[in-house]
Image (cartoon, rainbow, N blue to C red):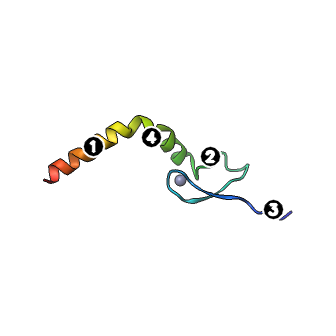
């Protein structure tokens, strides 16, 4: 038994992640990255708004 394990980049943090049955969060490297990706659409407006606010304050 010497099957090569496929390696995929985590969609959230790009960390090389083994695509195995043991990795139940695949293609993500961890539960955290999976939750971040699933919640990204919901937080996108807030993130953009927050970033714009930071830029405005610096000026
Ligand atoms: Zn990750």
Residue at horizontal 21%, vertical 44%? 53
N-terminal-most mark, 3 or 1: 3
Task: Determine whether, in the image, residue 42 is placed left or right of residue 29.
Answer: left
Determine the CA span between mark 1 and mark 4.
14 Å
Residue at horizontal 27%, vertical 40%? 49
Residue 50 is labelled as 1
For mark 2, does the 10 Å Cα neighbourhood hold few (<14), some (14 to 19), or many (20 or more) residues?
some
The residue tagged 3 is 3
**What is the secondary structure assignment of the residue under circle 4?**
helix
For mark 3, does the 10 Å Cα neighbourhood hold few (<14), some (14 to 19), or many (20 or more) residues?
few
Residue at horizontal 54%, vertical 51%? 11
The residue tagged 2 is 25
N-terminal-most mark, 1 or 2: 2
Determine the CA span between mark 3 and mark 2.
20 Å
The residue tagged 4 is 40
Determine the CA span between mark 3 and mark 1.
46 Å
N-terminal-most mark, 1 or 4: 4
Nearer mark to the viewer, of 4 and 2: 4
């Amino acid at each position: 038994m010497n099957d090569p394990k496929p390696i995929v980049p985590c969609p959230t943090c790009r960390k090389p992640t083994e695509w195995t049955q043991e990795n139940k969060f695949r293609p993500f490297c961890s539960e955290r990255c999976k939750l971040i990706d699933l919640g990204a659409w919901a937080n996108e407006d807030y993130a953009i708004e927050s970033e714009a606010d930071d830029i405005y304050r610096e000026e």
